[in-house]
Image (tube, rainbow, N blue to C red):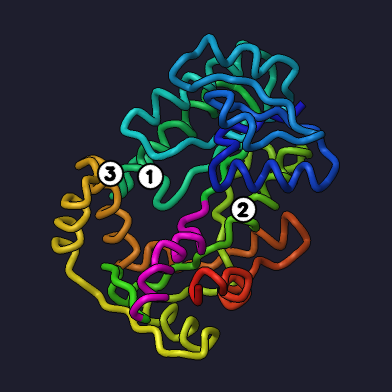
């Protein structure tokens, strides 16, 4: 049995759908009955549990041979994901496929990268088989700009001209689904990217071309972005993480392109132009 945590989130949900499309039965860990209804399907078994309640994970992991470990950003992320790893170790030899992210390293300038690295080390030290997947930036992040692009033809950020090898979540899910169903990738750590590195000015140019109207990118200083995020009500710890992201991306720390998606799945990753076409209604209304 394959277990999916974060089954109603972007990566977890997409991976669940990928597995079901391949005819693979899955178990989804969800926090409540309402979330269970969102992922219900003929090949999906749901179990209610929470990484913050370690004993609730026991039933979810019963009979599980591989599991996708992904959870939302949280200042207690190391403890929460550690709870899952401890439960997986008690359950048996579960292959843990962990979703990490930008700047994953114990000495990373990105604090969430340090959190991910601590958890990666914890699962490695546990003796469980593991695979680490490190997508630095989702193409889907661009969708948060869709309302302003529809309304005014512009979007605002703080990445300057830093290039980012962004990846479609569907390609992350395709890799995860393959890794979860084979032992060939155990012990590996993969950085997952799309086929090209784009700056936000590049994104504006691509959107302009695909939408057939001008889209402009307005860059603002990091401190201005910080103040706007705080004013929006975002918790300070989350603002700090977002500023870390922007600082790293401005410096080109996510500009390296890898061939992992095609090497693992046999298919090339989606281009940004494909992504725009698949979501064009969100940008045009």
User: In the figure, residue 266 lies in which quadrant?
Assistant: bottom right
Using residue 164 as the reference point, say whether residue 196 is left or right of it.
Answer: right
| Residue 172: numbered disc | 2
Query: Dot 3: what SS?
Result: helix
Is residue 214 shown to the viewer in this render?
yes
Q: Residues under labels 2 and 1: Cα distance?
A: 18 Å
Sequence-wise first label, 2 or 1: 1
The quadrant of the picture occupied by the N terminus is top right
Task: Tell me the residue that label 3 is attached to.
Answer: 238
Provide the residue span drawn in magenta: 135-152
Q: Nearer the viewer, mark 2 or mark 1?
A: 2
**Residue at left offset 44%, top offset 78%:** 203
The secondary element bearing badge 1 is classed as helix
Residue 87 in the image: state x and y as whole percent: 56, 15
Q: Is residue 155 above or below residue 264?
A: below
Q: Residue at x 18, y 58 (%)?
A: 228
The residue labelled by disc 1 is 113
């Amino acid at each position: 049995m394959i277990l999916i945590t974060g089954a109603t989130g972007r990566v977890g949900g997409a991976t669940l759908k990928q597995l079901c499309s391949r005819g693979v039965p899955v178990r989804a860990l969800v926090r409540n009955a309402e979330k269970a209804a969102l992922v219900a399907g003929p090949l999906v078994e749901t179990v209610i549990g929470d990484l913050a309640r370690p004993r609730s994970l026991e039933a979810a992991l019963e009979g599980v041979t591989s599991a996708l470990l992904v959870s939302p950003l949280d200042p207690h992320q190391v403890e929460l994901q550690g709870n899952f790893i401890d439960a997986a170790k008690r359950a048996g030899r579960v292959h843990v496929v962990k979703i990490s992210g930008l700047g994953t390293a114990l000495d990373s300038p990105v604090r969430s990268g340090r959190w991910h690295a601590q958890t990666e080390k914890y699962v490695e030290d546990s003796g469980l088989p593991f695979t680490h997947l490190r997508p630095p930036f989702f193409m889907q992040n661009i969708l948060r700009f869709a309302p302003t692009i529809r309304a005014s033809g512009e979007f605002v950020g703080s990445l300057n001209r830093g290039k980012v090898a962004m990846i479609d979540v569907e390609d992350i899910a395709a890799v995860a689904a393959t890794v979860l169903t084979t032992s060939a990738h155990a012990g590996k750590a993969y950085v997952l990217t799309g086929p090209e590195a784009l700056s936000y000015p590049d994104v504006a140019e691509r959107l302009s071309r695909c939408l057939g109207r001008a889209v402009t990118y307005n860059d603002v200083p990091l401190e201005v972005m910080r103040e706007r995020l705080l004013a929006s009500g975002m918790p300070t710890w989350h603002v700090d993480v977002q500023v870390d992201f922007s600082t790293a991306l401005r410096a080109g720390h996510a500009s390296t392109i890898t061939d992992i998606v095609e090497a693992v799945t046999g298919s090339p990753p989606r281009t940004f132009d494909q992504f725009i076409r698949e979501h064009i209604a969100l940008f045009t209304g």
